[in-house]
Amino acid sequence: MTAPLKDISPAERARSTSFYEASARTRLELLLDAGSFVEFIGPEQREASPHLKIFDLPEQFDDGIIVGHGRLDGSPVFVAAQEGRFMGGAFGEVHGAKLTGLLRAARQIGSIPVLILFDTGGVRLQEANAGELAIAEIMRALMEARSAGVKVIGLIGGRSGCYGGGGLIAGCCSALAVSEPGRIAVSGPEVIETNRGVEEFDSRDRALVWRTMGGKHRRLIGAADVFADDNVQDFREAALELLGLVGPFGLDRLRAEQRRLADRLRSFGGCGDAVDIWTAEGIAHAEAVPELPADQFIALANRIGRTSRDAR
Amino acid sequence: MTSWQNNRAARDARIAAGAGLARGKVVEAHDVTRLLEAVVRSGDRVCLEGDNQKQADLLSRALLAVDLSKVNDLHMVQSGVVLPEHLDLFDRGVAKRLDYAYSGPQSARIARMLFGGKIELGAVHTYLELFARYFIDLTPHVALIAAVSADREGNLYTGPNTEDTPTVVEATAFKDGVVIAQVNEIVDTVPRVDIPADRVHFIVKADKPFFVEPLFTRDPAAITEGQILTAMLAIKGVYAPYGVQRLNHGIGFSTAAIELLLPTFGERLGLKGTIASHFALNPHPALIPAIESGWVRQIHSFGSEVGMDDYIRARSDVYFTGSDGSLRSNRAFCQTAGLYACDMFIGSTLQIDLQGNSSTVTTSRIAGFGGAPNMGADARGRRHPSEPWLKAGAEADPDGSALMRRGRKLVVQIGETFGDKNVPLFVEKLDAIELAEKLKLDLAPVMIYGDDVTHIITEEGVANLLLCRTAQEREQAIRGVAGYTDVGRRRDHGMVSRLRERGVIRRPEDLGINPLDADRSLLAARSIKDLVRWSGGLYAPPSKFRNW
Amino acid sequence: MTLDDIIASLFPDGHEVRNDKGVILGSATLRSGGRMLVLGVADRTALGVDEAIRLSGHVLESIDRDSGPILVLVDSDSQRMSKRDELLGLNEFLAHLAKVLIHADMNGRPTIGLLYGHSAAGALLATGLATRVLVGLPGADPAVMDLPSMAKVTKLSMKALQEKAKSTPVFAPGLSNLAQMGAVHMTWSNARSLADQLEALLAGMPAVQDRRDALGKERGGRLKATEIAERVHDLALQAR
Amino acid sequence: MEDLNFQHQVRARAGGTRQRAIVGVVASGNLEVLVERSLPDAECVVDIKTAAMGFGAVWSAVIGDFVERYSPGGLKFSINDGGARPDTVSLRLAQAVRLIAEAGQ
């Protein structure tokens, strides 16, 4: 009666599957070459968080992150995918250590790139110190891996976005792909509202949240290099594209990033809202940017031409 | 000599008392409280337009500020008690008595105030009952209404959210009452005349547009697999066999799932054109994919929905629109349409008991009835036949004479056996009964009576109560679809399996539905953004529903 | 100890370190004779885009010009929580600062963090936690997450949280908890000359390798992290 | 948290060759089910850790019906539950059986 999903090709399935909505496991299954994924410390190992029971909270067997090895267009890649629905995809001790170990291995090998599918609210409150430290260790391991020639690509389009320390890790990646519903920031909307008041930031005004932190804004200011439509196939293609574009890391990148960020601050530091920034970028009818369909938006972003390529 | 025009004289005196504050009919916003003190008399019946969606919020605040020595002990007769100010009136003593129909967001506070004796309650009505009483024994002396714009003569344009306004004005203006309208703007020419100027006595330009809540938007992203399964059961187990074309949907997620399954699951079953073509329904965004796929022929609406204006304007073949192109809604007419011209009502509820009575009342909340009891009731006065109506009638009374047998409206309760926080849908005794005992009410606030309910659908299957011949069968049919709730686990297994053999209970597998196929990929739209795409960019959802 | 006291005690042979609106920039002469680049956040200032870009610029300017270790002094608020900072991409500015510090450390400019006051969340990640060795001074009060906010989210009372905090260092604020987790390598004494303690550290600087997870295990604060990371590492090496 | 354990003797071994499968996530109103082919053919074990206290009787009924209907012989189910409703539990269990019945390892 219903067309079984098995009958369609993996690419068609990936094309029709929303990245935002899919689970971390489904994202990996459809992102990688069919059947190529091998998980490290899978759920059957039951390496859950040792800390949640202190708070009488349920555990998840994989602690909310899946790490492993697979192939992308035939080439080997390491992958990590956060499950944004389990505790908001937040970093805890075990969760973080899985990614740290993966990056350390990638560094040692040097030639196999790493894809990180972010979906996180940041540090897991119930193990805040362990989570914060895990993020510090991941940032260190990531930069050591990049310094050893490893390409690390971040894919951002999950329901929990990429917040807190997750935003800092994303900032360390060689390149990012982001979709419209994807968000990248340090402080979450509710945190800003709680600390600074609703006049500073109305967290319930979702149009405001997305134009301040969402995928389109991040692409337009050059924080992300590729804008993906919200389906897994588009993220797969974005990952392949970025792997082809990324060059080796070095001091010149950091100098270029310093210039890039200082220039951003000079050009847009006085803007009160994303629409002001887009207008300053020379976009006519900037207020209509959130409504643009993906193809038109991509054309616009390419015309504006801001990227972080060779400058991160 | 007896005077037979006292009321008209009194009305003229009220208008004269207010005229000093007006230029023509126009009163400045800062003078409105003084206007009300001049026009309203203590003890008056006042309709303060609080609809299901649209609120005369400026007039509410102005009425709350009156000098109590001039205006007090009012009798409020309004369909919606929605704004905090509506109840502040009673706390302050401006108003004393209340007759109403719906109190959604104020349901907890209104319960507290009723217990505390702050409000003298007339009755909780359905919309149609309250509207009817406007013309019999609850006619307002003063109506405080809301419109989009007015011209200087007082002609009003109510815009897409016309809702209750024509009914309120009809009852007030033609029975010597005074009508005061708040409008968002005063213009030279209104886009269309919804209320003619001779029925309007004062107009006030509000400082900001009247408040409208988007009550009928269900984000497809929040629809669960369980709701999809119940929606599949409804389409295949009720819509299809009865051929239901004329219907009303509730506002829950299960019915939103049905709307989103029509172009996918419904299409594969070949049902297009045979079901779900004519609706009494607000402009639900979730229905956009079905409309765009050619399922829906016509929709008449109680009110509008925020963000749907441009879409409605561009789809006038489907919606009722005025000469200006925008939606014309009308709650009284649409309620009547739902009662008499629809063959099915399907909606969700909070509690169902063993007789099939249902209620949305809990012991601490009195949400009122709104329109559901009229939608979800068999219209005993109905005389025109239709296939679903006749088929349902025949199922209920197979041995009766075909020519003398009444048809039956299909009244379908749909829901999951457990609701939020694992609260069971099925109970031995409704909270409504406890509430009635506590408040010493004459009637328990039952939303839909069991004898009107024809089907109950849960993820466990479809129970067809029309086919039950005894009270015991009916109880076991209900227990049979009550799943793992206490009510469900106390079923008589033997009787339930006999009911299943007779088709009284139909499990998913009896309908050829595999619960594992109840997947979100079946939804024609899985997000608000998808709905915007289906609408060709015409649907403009309010900010709280966006993730872009 | 005030910032001035600390700097005076660290660098008795002289320094050019300025505190400009909470942003610490400068350099100093080490007792051993070499120079040390100094930067940091003072006066419990929030770390936003404007502060972060100055700090990263200070390090980058020094990288080709100078040699010697780098000191990051920390008494900050959290990251600046504002619409403007997020609009401009605060995550990139903070990450950039951390990257610059990590790069310097890996390339002959060993980094030391000195946590002498408060710090939290993103600000700590971009400063102290991005150095090779993080030193605490007595009285420092870092808080990844403060207990009142935790109480709000977990719906537990402050008392219940404080009770839980006695049995584990994993969530509660404080220098000793971070030390037990392996984040803070050592705590110096206020009673002794900071210069002595700095020289001792520089003389025996640990290797570049990040051993914080192992340290956390040795101190009984993080029992799983190092084992999990090693297992994934080994599996990954086998899988290629 | 509450721990529950159910052991059933079943009619037949579950189909398929996969050794294990996992479905669902732990979130409010949701659960994960890890299923492993690790028991003798006539046995089925279900281990549950749930955040919702006091629903043992409901779990017992749900698991009983599930075992009766699917005869999942040889399978061990391990559940982390975030307070899911019985219909969601039934659905996840059925999904787990379907997944492990697929060909594969």
Image (spheres, coloured by chain):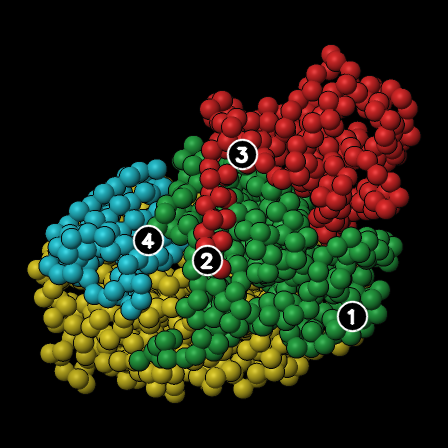
Chain colours: A green, B yellow, C red, D cyan
Quadrant placement of the C terminus of chain B: bottom right
Disc 2/disc 3 C-alpha distance (Å): 24 Å
Q: Label 1: chain?
A: A
What residue is shown at x 40% (from left), y 52% (from top)?
A42
Tag shown at residue A305: 1
Tag shown at residue B243: none
Quickly name the residue at label 4: D33
| Nearer to me, B514 or A15 | A15
| Nearer to me, B510 or B496 | B510
B294 horizontally vs A304: left or right: left
Q: Amino acid at mark 1?
A: Gly
Quickly name the residue at label 2: C239
Disc 3/disc 1 C-alpha distance (Å): 45 Å
> Same chain, marks 2 and 4?
no
Disc 4/disc 1 C-alpha distance (Å): 46 Å
| Nearer to me, B153 or A191 | A191
What residue is shown at x 49% (from left), y 53% (from top)?
C237
What residue is shown at x 82% (from left), y 66% (from top)?
A281
B477 horizontally vs B547: left or right: left
Pointer 3 with pointer 1, Cβ within 8 A = no
Tag shown at residue C214: 3
Q: Compared with residue B196, is residue A83 higher up or lower down, i.e. above or below?
A: above
Q: Dot 1 lies on which element?
A: loop
What residue is shown at x 69% (from left), y 77% (from top)?
A296
Q: Label 4: chain?
A: D
Q: Amino acid at mark 2?
A: Ala
